[in-house]
Structures are given as C-alpha cells and as structure tokens.
Amino acid sequence: MSDAAEFVSFTLGNVRVSGFVTPDELSRIHSGKVVDVLLRQVIAIHGDVGEEVSLGDVACTFIGGEPSPFALPRN
C-alpha cells in the first residue's frame, strides 16, 4: 500500500490537476529543489468542460515548487 496521502493540486493553463504524493515528496517539492515524483491517482479537469479525467499515476518533475514541462539532465 502506498503512503501517498498528501494532496497536491495545481493549474496548468485552463486545466486543474490533482493527485497524491508521499509526505517526503511533498517536503521536497516545497523545498524548491528539482524533484522527480510520482503523482498518484491523478485527476485532470479542463476549465471549459468541467469533466474529470482520471490519468492514473503520472511522473512529474517540480522545479522551484512548480510543475515543470521538462526535466533537467542528471549527472
């Protein structure tokens, strides 16, 4: 069983995205560093349509506490 119990939600354009991360992942996101996480049970809702779309688990990179459209190269 996953310990992803921390709810996160953010807006990308006109789409609201929400899901769950672990307490450690949430702490690292809030640190502002480059963080790769697995968002669990992701739901997306387009503002013009309003219908929920389940995306399952989605890998995401956060930079400066915000979702990033790209991942920085790792050494």
Image (tube, rainbow, N blue to C red):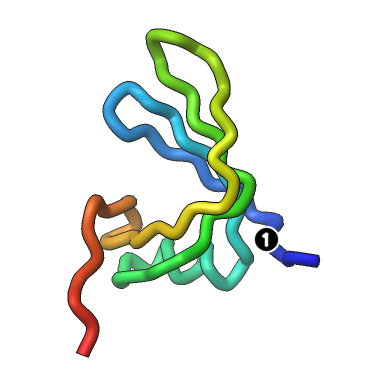
Q: Nearer the viewer, residue 7 or 55?
A: 55
The total of numbered circles placed on residues is 1
Along the line of sight, the residue nearer the viewer: 22 or 31: 22
Tell whether 5 sits left or right of 11: right
62 over 25 or under it: above or below: above
Side (left or right) of 64 relative to 36: left
What percent of the width, then of the height, locates residue 60? 40, 57
Task: Name the residue beneath numbered marker 1.
Answer: 4
Name the image quarter holding residue 28.
bottom left
Q: Which residue is depicted at the point 59% across and 34% down? A: 54
Question: Which quadrant of the structure image shows residue 70?
Answer: bottom left
> Which residue is rendered at x = 74% and y = 65% of the image?
2
Rendered view: 16 above or below 7: above
Q: Is residue 30 above or below residue 13?
A: below
- Residue at the bottom extreme? 75
Please name the residue shown 37% across and 70% down the image: 35
Quarter of the picture holding the N terminus: bottom right
- Dot 1: what SS? loop
Query: Which amino acid, by three-letter code, is at mark 1?
Result: Ala
Q: Residue furthest top?
A: 48
- For label 1, the crowd category at 10 Å Cα-Cα, with few meaning under 14, some 14 to 19 and many 20 or more, is some
Residue 12: % across, % down: 32, 34
Q: Nearer the viewer, residue 64 or 46?
A: 46
Task: Give the residue at x 49% y 40%.
Answer: 9
The C terminus lies in which quarter of the figure?
Answer: bottom left
Is 38 placed left or right of 12 in the picture?
right
